[in-house]
């Protein structure tokens, strides 16, 4: 019983740390002008932390971390509208990443699809809210960029996970 309680405290602390990392990376990302004339393009740095949680912890924990990150980011930096778009992209992206991970795809592929699906979720919500299909052209640009940023994030997450595994830390 005592070990289980200690494990839960350590796991809760780890989740708090991962949430803080996602928020800090999201804030830093908002300060970096990736593509000056194209709104909505981001590097997806906090997605690397989400990938770490998905591969090193478990699916429910990763999903909850995504929701907590979206809500806290929205409250601190974006507002309700930004939170809605981030939630649409985050839910679709995370569900797709969970599915691809279970099917055995490499983490870099999972990250790339996650980045693309995040953009798809956001643009689909915008198309519904604005009642226009014209944003499908914009989605094409975001999907191409998502493939690149997702690959970079996937490489970083893969490298981090390899190094953490060498430490023989127990997360599950």
Image (cartoon, grey):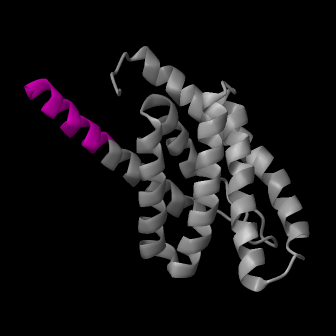
- Residue at 56% x, 42% y is 48
- Residue at 8% x, 27% y is 2
Q: Which residues are magenta?
A: 1-14
Q: Residue furthest bottom?
A: 130
Residue 151 in percent (x, y) is at: 73, 39
Q: Inspect the magenta stretch and tell me whether residue 103 lies in it.
A: no
Identify the image quadrant of the N terminus: top left
- Residue at 63% x, 37% y is 99
- Residue at 51% x, 31% y is 55
User: What predominant SS class does the magenta segment belong to?
Assistant: helix
In the image shown, does 17 or 117 lie closer to the viewer?
117
Residue 118 in percent (x, y) is at: 68, 56
In the image shown, does 67 or 72 lie closer to the viewer?
67
In the figure, is residue 76 to the left or right of 17?
right
Identify the image quadrant of the C terminus: top left
Residue 7 in percent (x, y) is at: 21, 31
Query: Is residue 15 visible to the viewer in this orientation of the structure?
Result: yes
In the figure, is residue 61 to the left or right of 118?
left
Residue 10 sits in quarter: top left
Q: Is residue 76 above or below residue 155?
A: below
In the figure, is residue 24 to the left or right of 99?
left
Tally the numbered discs. 0
Residue 35 sits in quarter: bottom right
Q: Is residue 71 above or below residue 112?
A: below
Residue 72 in percent (x, y) is at: 41, 66
In the figure, is residue 1 to the left or right of 26?
left
Query: Is residue 31 visible to the viewer in this orientation of the structure?
Result: no
């Amino acid at each position: 019983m005592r070990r289980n309680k200690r494990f839960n405290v350590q796991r809760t602390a780890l989740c708090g740390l991962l949430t803080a990392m996602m928020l800090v990376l999201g804030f830093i990302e908002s300060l970096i002008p990736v593509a000056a004339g194209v709104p909505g393009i981001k590097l997806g740095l906090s997605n690397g932390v989400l990938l770490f949680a998905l591969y090193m912890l478990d699916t429910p924990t990763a999903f909850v971390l995504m929701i907590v990150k979206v809500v806290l980011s929205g409250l601190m930096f974006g507002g309700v509208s930004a939170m809605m778009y981030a939630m649409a992209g985050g839910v679709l992206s995370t569900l797709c990443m969970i599915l691809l991970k279970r099917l055995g795809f490499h983490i870099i592929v999972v990250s790339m699809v996650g980045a693309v699906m995040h953009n798809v979720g956001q643009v689909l919500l915008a198309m519904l809210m604005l009642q226009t299909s014209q944003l499908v052209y914009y989605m094409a640009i975001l999907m191409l960029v998502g493939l690149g940023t997702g690959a970079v994030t996937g490489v970083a997450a893969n490298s981090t996970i390899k190094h953490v595994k060498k430490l023989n830390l127990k997360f599950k």
